Image: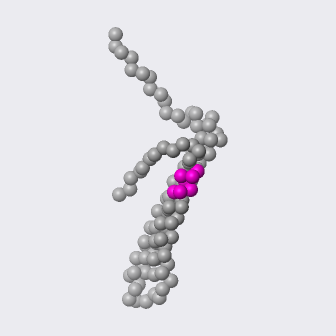
Amino acid sequence: MKVNISYSVELEEVLENVRHLFLKSEENLRDEEEHFVRVLKGEYNDENLGEVVKTIHEYKETLAKFDLKLGEMTNILMGYYQLKYQPEQMAGQEAPHEEPNKEEE
């Protein structure tokens, strides 16, 4: 099950946080990729055909997860850029402020 985790960082920390996110994601991809490449570069025969097909599917799923992570990073960086260099465009996108509750007389 996937869940979204959200947290805040200072504007000046965004780029370093995205960099760390990439490094962690890329490291995870490389770790899993070693197994996939070992199987897929090996011999293909009738006995291991099931393992080869399973490995291809797992490899595709891993690449898709990495692609999603890259998309998330792109969205963060685009938001960072807009906030930093086009703040006037972001002003219209702010959530409306609620009026304070008035006490009944």
Quick check: can you spot residue 86? Answer: yes
Is residue 35 or residue 2 the one in the foreground? 35
Is residue 29 or residue 51 the one in the foreground? 29
Percent of width and height locating residue 55: 43, 76
Percent of width and height locating residue 89: 61, 37
| Quadrant occupied by the C terminus | top left
Percent of width and height locating residue 4: 41, 50
Furthest residue toward top: 105
Which residue shows up at 51% across the image and 57% down it? 21
Q: How many marks?
A: 0
Is 16 colored magenta in this rendering?
Answer: yes
Quick check: can you spot residue 64? Answer: no
Is 78 colored magenta in this rendering?
Answer: no
User: Considering only vertical position in the picture, is 81 above or below 35?
Assistant: above
Percent of width and height locating residue 79: 57, 45
What residue span does the magenta drawing correspond to?
15-21
User: Considering only vertical position in the picture, is 33 above or below 78?
Assistant: below
Colour setting: one colour
The reply, left or right, for residue 82 in relation to residue 36 is right
Which residue shows up at 52% across the image and 34% down it? 94
Which residue shows up at 47% across the image and 66% down it? 28
Provide the major secondary structure of the magenta segment. Answer: helix
The reply, left or right, for residue 83 in relation to residue 63 is right
| Quadrant occupied by the N terminus | bottom left
Which residue shows up at 46% across the image and 87% down it? 44
Furthest residue toward right: 85
